[in-house]
Image: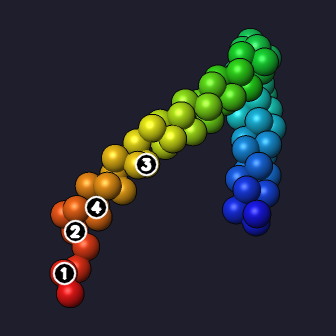
Amino acid sequence: MWLSIGTLVLWLGWFFFNGGSAYTLFNKAVNPAKIIQNTILAAGAGGGIVFFVKKPIHLWYMRCCRKQG
């Protein structure tokens, strides 16, 4: 539960950090909505990759790298 809450807090913090810093850095020439949209897409892509890659990596690890005892 705490891991999920911490991830949510960091994710929301990135919205403000990315959108706000780019908005002031480029002197209001860049639309912050576009930057926040890219942040949402990046989080979704990362979550999707973990969802599909976690099980094959776990199966490979259990087959190859666990201690024989």
Asked whether disc 4 touches disc 2, contact meaning CB atoms under 8 Å apart, the reply is yes
Q: Could you tell me how far apart the alpha carbons at marks 2 and 3 are, in whole angstroms? A: 16 Å
Residue ID for mark 3: 54
1 vs 4, front mark: 1
Q: What's under tag 2, amino acid-wise?
A: Cys
Q: Could you tell me how far apart the alpha carbons at marks 2 and 1 are, in whole angstroms? A: 9 Å
Q: Could you tell me how far apart the alpha carbons at marks 4 and 3 are, in whole angstroms? A: 11 Å
Residue ID for mark 2: 65
How many neighbours does mark 3 have within 10 angstroms: few (below 14), some (14-19), or many (20 or more)?
A: few
Q: What's under tag 3, amino acid-wise?
A: Lys
Q: What's under tag 4, amino acid-wise?
A: Tyr
Residue 27 at what x, y percent from top left?
A: 76, 20
Q: Is residue 29 above or below residue 6?
A: above
Q: Could you tell me how far apart the alpha carbons at marks 1 and 4 are, in whole angstroms? A: 13 Å
Residue 7 at what x, y percent from top left?
A: 71, 53
Query: The C terminus appears in which quarter of the rendering?
Result: bottom left
How many neighbours does mark 2 have within 10 angstroms: few (below 14), some (14-19), or many (20 or more)?
A: few
Colour scheme of the rendered structure: rainbow
Q: Earlier in the sequence, mark 4 or mark 3?
A: 3
Judged from the image, the secondary structure of the residue bearing numbered disc 2 is loop
Q: Could you tell me how far apart the alpha carbons at marks 3 and 1 are, in whole angstroms? A: 23 Å
3 vs 1, front mark: 1
Residue 30 in view (yes/no): yes
Which residue does the image show at 22% across and 62% down from the upper left?
63
Q: Earlier in the sequence, mark 2 or mark 3?
A: 3
How many neighbours does mark 4 have within 10 angstroms: few (below 14), some (14-19), or many (20 or more)?
A: few
Mark number, residue 68: 1
Residue ID for mark 4: 61
Judged from the image, the secondary structure of the residue bearing numbered disc 3 is helix
Asked whether disc 2 touches disc 1, contact meaning CB atoms under 8 Å apart, the reply is no
